[in-house]
Image (spheres, rainbow, N blue to C red):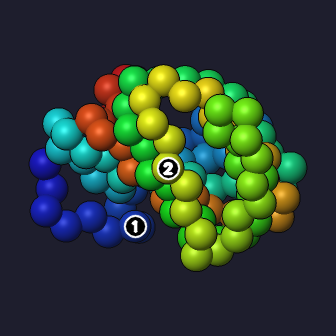
Amino acid sequence: MKSFVKNTDVLLEKVAPGMTRQIMGYTPNLMVVRVFFEKNAIGYNHTHHHEQVSYVEKGKFEVNIDGKKAILEAGDAFVVAPHLDHGALCLEDGILIDTFSPRREDFLK
């Protein structure tokens, strides 16, 4: 585990059309991921057992959590409890800072 992580040292990985991510740091119980979205990219609805808090660093997103929708912009955040269906549509180029507890083992494979 690194104590300091430089943005320029973390590779971008393509995760879906119009989406790339950087895993910025993690411990067994916590993970921070920076996700870059192009306009109209879709983070398709999904569920997982992790707690998630996401911060909108840049852009505008339509976020859907458990059937409820909200438009969120830079400076806003959303919280997803374990096992809730959620997803996001990027309305203008943007960046989300996703935090997960525990860490997303599936992201490390």
Q: Residue at x 55, y 62 (%)?
A: 77
Q: Which quarter shows the C terminus?
A: top left
Is residue 94 visible to us here?
Answer: yes
> What percent of the width, then of the height, locates residue 63?
71, 48
Q: Secondary structure at mark 2?
A: strand
> Which callout, 2 or 1, points to the residue nearer the camera?
2
* Amino acid bearing label 1: Asn
* Residue at left offset 65%, top offset 32%: 66
> In this orientation, which residue lies closer to the viewer: 57 or 16?
57
* Relative side of 29 to 90, left or right: left
Whole-percent x, y for residue 82 in the image: 43, 29
Q: Position of residue 89 (x, y in %)?
A: 78, 47
Query: Who's the residue at 44% across and 51% down the image?
Result: 53
- The reply to whether residue 22 is in sight is no
Which mark identifies residue 84? none
* Left or right for 42, reference 82: right
Kind of element beneath mark 1? helix
Question: How many numbered marks appear?
Answer: 2
Say above or below: 46 vs 64: above
56 displayed left or right of 11: right
The amino acid type, in three-letter code, at marker 2 is Val
Distance Cα–Cα, label 2 vs label 1: 25 Å
Closer to the chain start, of discs 2 and 1, is 1
Residue designated by label 2: 79
Q: Mark 1, residues whose alpha carbon is within 10 Å: few (<14), some, or many (≥20)?
A: few
- The x and y percentages for residue 32 are 36, 52
What residue is disc 1 on?
A: 7
101 is higher (above) or lower (below) than 4: above
Q: Place residue 7 in its image quadrant.
A: bottom left
Task: Tell me if mark 2 has few (under 14), some (14-19) or many (20+) residues whose alpha carbon lies within 10 angstroms of its own.
Answer: few
Indicate the quadrant where residue 10 lies.
bottom left
